[in-house]
Amino acid sequence: MKQLPMLDLRLQYEYMKNDIDAALKKCLDHQKWILGPEVKELEDKIAAYLGVKHCIGASSGTESLVMSLRALSISLTGREFFDGTDEIITTPFTFTATGDTILRAGATPVFIDVDPDTYNIDVRKVRQYLTSPQKGKVVGIVPVHLYGQSCDMDEVMRLAGEFNLFVVEDVAQAFGGSWKGRKLGSIGDFGSFSFFPAKNLGGFGDGGIISTNNDQTAELVRMLLKHGGKDKYNVDHVGYNGRLDTLQAAILLAKFKYIEEFNERRGRVAGQYDNGLKGLDGIVTPRTLPDAQHVYHQYTLRCTRGDRDEFQKRLKDKGVSTMVYYPYPLHKMKVFGNGRSKTFGSLANAEKASESVFSLPIEPLQSAEDTAYVIECVKGLVS
């Protein structure tokens, strides 16, 4: 029986083996493992690709978010951390790190429901909160470009300007995506990226990068990731050991040359899924916004009838792997209870999504034949 994994990293390695092996050998030759030359080279190349002044490598996407928020607290308030009266708006339908990093930066996350079609934060409801009596001292927004598709960044930035808020884009799942031709991570005050191995641009371990056009906050981030100071023996701020490893930077440089090709391949797989699955009773295919370049980190379906878990089990029996991103909305998690977070209005769309969505394999090197097999398996379960 055919077996289709969600992602085949070995297949990707074989495809770019010569580039990766050469990059690793270069590191073995120079032995500069901490902030070696590959880190600066990667930062410069990604900054040029995104069209921003600064990119700063980090140890993970999570730490990228934390240090972005910390730099904003220091620059905007003069305090090392935000406090509990500072509110940062985000979505409850995302990975834990998005909300957790707001807590780690000292602020209170405010969870606002998602659009039921794109699963990104509903900007209309953000406006409703910002004009409601329940609004506290909101200082910023962290929009998440979920599954590889941009939020409505026109409206996000309009709200930020109108209410004097910062914007930190969570681009962990959307490297290479864009909104109206602008690369994601170049629109807000900061962009935060993850290089977790499964991402569109992934390393051989954890890693991340922070993008910004602001000289002052870029300098603060560079201090924070090296224990909080320009001189690690005489520091200014509560910092982190948050550097990007030279080895990961080298691997990412080798893989970076393939990012446009691989994102285009993901789009072709998604297009084949769309053509084969749209209009079927019992499932809903992804909706793509006309102004967004979707890079399909995930291809996510929604079950509209029947049991999602049973659907997954039956696909597994046919050799088709699936995953649920995400089975628990953040506001239902213990870590965000006990007054650590706020919610606004109903979060029914996020709750429904957590109970009904699942993602299909969308490996960039996935063959048309394998994609057709997945389509036939899904059709066989809903027809």
Image: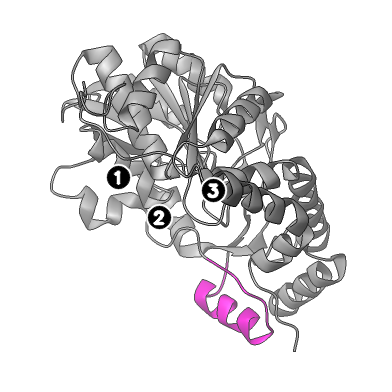
| Residue 228 percent across, percent down from the top left | 26, 27
Q: Quadrant of residue 81?
A: top left
Return the x and y of residue 301 as percentages of the image width and height. Answer: 62, 60
In the rendered view, does 72 fall on the left or right side of 376?
left
Task: Answer whether residue 69 is magenta in the image.
Answer: no
Which residue was labeled with disc 2? 351
Secondary element at tag 1: helix
Residue type of the residue flagged with mark 2: Glu
Residue at image location 20% in from the left, 33% down from the top: 106
Residue type indicated by callout 3: Gln
Could you tell me residue 91's position as x and y percent?
Answer: 40, 40
Residue that carries the numbered disc 3 in the rendered image? 248
Residue 195 left/right relative to 8: left
The answer to whether residue 26 shows anywhere in this view is: yes
Q: How is the image coloured?
A: one colour
| Residue segment shown in magenta | 305-323
Q: Is residue 317 magenta?
A: yes
At label 3, counting other C-alpha atoms closer than 10 Å, the crowd grade (few under 14, some 14-19, many 20 or more) is: many
Report if residue 202 is visible in the image.
no
Determine which quarter of the picture holds residue 183.
top right
In the picture as drawn, the residue positioned furthest to the left comes out as 338
Q: CA distance from mark 1 to mark 2?
A: 19 Å
Q: Secondary structure at mark 2?
A: helix
Which quadrant: the C terminus? bottom right
**Residue named by callout 1:** 100
Please tell me how many numbered marks the rendered image carries: 3
Work out which quarter of the rendered image holds the N terminus and state it: bottom right
Residue 150: image location, x then y, percent: 60, 35
The residues bearing labels 3 and 2 have C-alpha atoms spaced at a distance of: 36 Å
Q: Is residue 66 left or right of residue 41?
A: left
